Image (cartoon, rainbow, N blue to C red):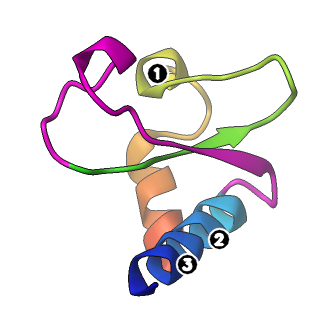
Amino acid sequence: MLFMKTLRIVANAVRQAYDGVDYNIILNNGPGAGQEVPHLHFHIIPRFSKAELKDWEEMEGEETSRAQIIEEIKKNL
């Protein structure tokens, strides 16, 4: 259960970095499901509306840079 506790802690840090937005936790299991890196990892994806789901590439050029977001997440851990 330590794994799930850690996942909750990181997800909460992501939520705080994005001013309290909701999020999805996604696991792509196998190449057919979109898994590109062959090890267990989860994606914590902020959601700004029901229809909007962005990945890093789509966020390029937005007001907040990846580096800023990463620093905000680290600060909230």
Asked where in the image residue 36 lies, by quadrant, the reply is: top left
- Residue ID for mark 3: 9
- Residue ID for mark 2: 12
Q: Amino acid at mark 3?
A: Ile
Q: Amino acid at mark 2?
A: Asn
Dominant secondary structure of the residues highlighted in magenta in the image: loop
Magenta stretch in the rendered image: 18-39
Q: Nearer the viewer, residue 34 or 63?
A: 34
Q: Nearer the viewer, residue 19 or 55?
A: 55
Asked where in the image residue 8 lies, by quadrant, the reply is: bottom right
Q: Nearer the viewer, mark 2 or mark 1?
A: 2
**Few, some or many C-alpha atoms within 10 Å of disc 3 (few <14, some 14-19, many ≥20)?**
some
Indicate whether residue 23 is drawn in magenta. Answer: yes
Q: Which circle's residue, 2 or 1, is located before the other in the chain?
A: 2
Please indicate whether residue 66 sits to the left or right of residue 53 in the image.
left
Distance of label 1 from label 3 (alpha carbons): 26 Å
